[in-house]
Image: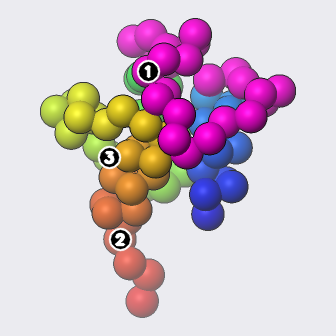
Amino acid sequence: METKFLEMMAEVFEMEDKVMLMSDTFRDYDMWDSLTQLSLIAEIDDVYNVVIDGEAFKKLTTLSDLYEAIQQRMTPVN
């Protein structure tokens, strides 16, 4: 699942040719801006059917933090 997540992140940040690590601080990427943030939130909703509100999103700093936030909000499949 982490591989799929990292692939999605590379696409959103247009960094398909770079190695992304779960320990990366995504806000430090060159592509990070308000439009990228909106794109990222929309992509998370589309791919994972998860919504992370603005206040919770502000507290996330690394890709690992973001991944964990998604995992916590996913509805278990019965």
> Is residue 46 at least partly visible in the picture?
no
Res. 75 mark: 2
Query: Residue most toward the bottom?
Result: 78
The reply, left or right, for residue 8 in relation to residue 22 is: right
Res. 27 mark: 1
* Quadrant of image for the N terminus: bottom right
Is residue 25 or residue 77 the one in the foreground? 25
Is residue 76 or residue 55 the one in the foreground? 55
Q: Secondary structure at mark 3?
A: loop
User: Which residue position is annotated with label 3?
Assistant: 51
At label 2, which amino acid type do we have? Thr
Give the residues in magenta.
Answer: 13-36
* Quadrant of image for the C terminus: bottom left
The reply, left or right, for residue 57 in relation to residue 12 is: left
Q: Position of residue 33 (x, y in %)?
A: 44, 10
**Mark 1: few/some/many CA within 10 Å (<14, 14-19, 20+):** some
For the point 49% across and 27% down, the residue is: 26
Is residue 8 or residue 23 the one in the foreground? 23
At label 1, which amino acid type do we have? Arg
At label 3, which amino acid type do we have? Val
Q: CA distance from mark 2 to mark 3?
A: 11 Å
How is the structure coloured here? Answer: rainbow
> Is residue 40 at least partly visible in the picture?
yes
Q: CA distance from mark 2 to mark 1?
A: 27 Å
Q: Position of residue 16 (x, y in %)?
A: 78, 30
